[in-house]
Amino acid sequence: MSRAELLVRLQKVQQTPEMQGRNIRSIASILSNEALLKHVEVCEEAVEKARRVN
């Protein structure tokens, strides 16, 4: 997956109500593509978990 695609995924996660008020995108500029992929996956999982609880 390209870096641009990962950034789009991260932007979509940032826009969810569960992530409002959290800055999850600023770190993206210093992460490698592999680390960025992991960061996106962890953030997506956090949103899913929050939705299951609510």
Image: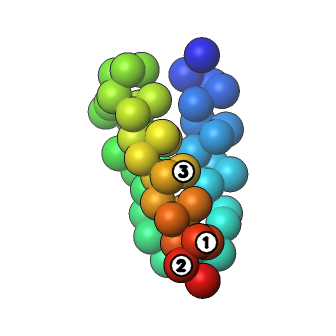
Please tell me which residue is depicted at 35% across the width and 45% down the height of the picture. 27
Identify residue for label 1. 51
Q: Which mark is residue 44?
A: 3
Work out whether mark 2 precedes mark 3 in sequence or the reverse, and give the earlier one.
3
Identify residue for label 2. 53
- Foreground mark, 1 or 3, reads 1
Q: Evaluate whether residue 19 shows in this view.
A: no
Marks 1 and 2 in Cβ contact (< 8 Å): yes
How far apart in space, not on screen, are marks 2 and 3 (Cα)? 15 Å
Residue 21 x, y percent position in the rendering: 49, 77
Q: Quadrant of the C terminus?
A: bottom right
Please tell me which residue is depicted at 57% across the width and 60% down the height of the picture. 48
In the rendered view, does 28 fall on the left or right side of 17? left
User: What element does badge 1 sit on?
Assistant: helix
Please identify the quarter of the rendering in which residue 6 is found: top right
Name the colouring of the figure: rainbow
Residue 44 x, y percent position in the rendering: 54, 50
How far apart in space, not on screen, are marks 1 and 3 (Cα)? 11 Å
Count residues near mark 1 (Cα–Cα under 10 Å), then give few for <14, some for 14-19, many for 20+. few
In the rendered view, does 8 fall on the left or right side of 38? right
Residue 15 x, y percent position in the rendering: 66, 63
Please tell me which residue is depicted at 48% across the width and 41% down the height of the picture. 40
In the rendered view, does 38 fall on the left or right side of 16? left
- Against 12, residue 6 (above or below) is above
Q: Quadrant of the N terminus?
A: top right
Please tell me which residue is depicted at 59% across the width and 71% down the height of the picture. 52
